[in-house]
Image (cartoon, helix red, strand yellow):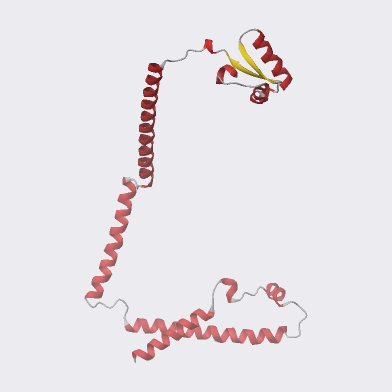
């Protein structure tokens, strides 16, 4: 550890660094003392504490010229690294762009669908421009009258059922919900329809008829 980092360490520092090997401070202290006795490392005493350092004569210390060359080489490597990161970022951006773009087949399919929709709308528009009536007035009246009759019948039957149901269940000890399920009855809401929305449509229809008269 002292040789790898080439910095002063005490026995506690070394023990902390070697903790993953389950080495106790006492064992580390003995090992450091043995290395010092053999001359592989040196130490200095500061009171009761020993500071261990690697022997500097075993390292190749670069001179000023070599340090300058190393700085230039490091600067060049940093520049190359920045260029590589920039190139990677550009490639990633291009890949993301390609992933969001449609394929040629998808583009052609979408184009064909849009052309078909445009053609259909143009045909309808041309009919309206030439004064062609898409729905004959008599057909429209038949449909509206049929709609009005069915909504009115719906209201009438709903009212009749409510009166009958109230008479049946008025003195019945059974729970109305359970009784309804037992008889297999379904309300409008049970099948996802709402009489009120159709009544509103009928009211709007009657209003338009009055205005057009």
Question: Residue 42, position in %: x, y?
Answer: 62, 13
Q: Quadrant of the N terminus?
A: top right
Name, please, the residue furthest toward the top.
38
Picture residue at 37% right of the left edge, 31% below the top: 84
Question: Residue 183, position in %: x, y?
Answer: 68, 75
Residue 35 lies left or right of residue 204; in this view the side is right
Toward which corner of the image does residue 124 lie, by quadrant? bottom left
Residue 41 lies left or right of residue 113; in this view the side is right
Disc count in the image?
0
Q: Observer-nearest residue: 72 or 191?
A: 72
Residue 209 lies left or right of residue 178; in this view the side is left
Name, please, the residue furthest toward the left.
130
Q: Observer-nearest residue: 167 or 42?
A: 42
With respect to residue 6, does 158 lie above or below? below
Picture residue at 53% right of the left edge, 80% below the top: 195
Q: Observer-nearest residue: 101 or 21?
A: 21
Toward which corner of the image does residue 203 lie, by quadrant? bottom left
Picture residue at 34% right of the left edge, 84% below the top: 138
Question: Residue 7, position in %: x, y?
Answer: 57, 21
With respect to residue 183, does 82 lie above or below? above
Q: Quadrant of the C terminus?
A: bottom left
Name, please, the residue furthest toward the right.
173
Question: Residue 177, position in %: x, y?
Answer: 70, 75
Toward which corner of the image does residue 64 lie, by quadrant? top left
Picture residue at 72% right of the left edge, 18% below the top: 27
């Amino acid at each position: 550890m002292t040789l790898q980092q080439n910095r002063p360490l005490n026995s506690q520092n070394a023990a902390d660094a070697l903790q993953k090997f389950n080495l106790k401070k006492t064992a580390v202290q003995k090992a450091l003392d043995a290395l010092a006795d053999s001359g592989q490392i040196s130490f200095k005493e500061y009171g009761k504490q020993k500071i261990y350092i690697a022997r500097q004569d075993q390292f190749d210390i670069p001179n000023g010229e070599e340090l300058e060359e190393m700085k230039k080489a490091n600067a060049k490597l940093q520049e190359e690294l920045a260029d590589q990161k920039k190139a990677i970022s550009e490639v990633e951006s291009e890949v993301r762009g390609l992933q969001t773009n449609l394929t040629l087949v998808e583009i052609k399919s979408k184009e064909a669908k849009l052309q078909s929709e445009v053609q259909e709308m143009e045909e309808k528009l041309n009919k309206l421009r030439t004064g062609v009536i898409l729905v004959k007035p008599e057909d429209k009246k038949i449909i509206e009258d049929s709609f009005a009759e069915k909504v009115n019948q719906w209201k009438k039957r709903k009212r009749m059922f409510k009166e009958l149901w109230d008479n049946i269940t008025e003195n019945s000890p059974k729970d109305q919900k359970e009784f309804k399920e037992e008889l297999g009855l379904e309300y409008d809401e049970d099948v996802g329809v709402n009489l009120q929305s159709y009544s509103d449509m009928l009211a709007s229809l009657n209003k338009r008829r009055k205005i057009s008269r």
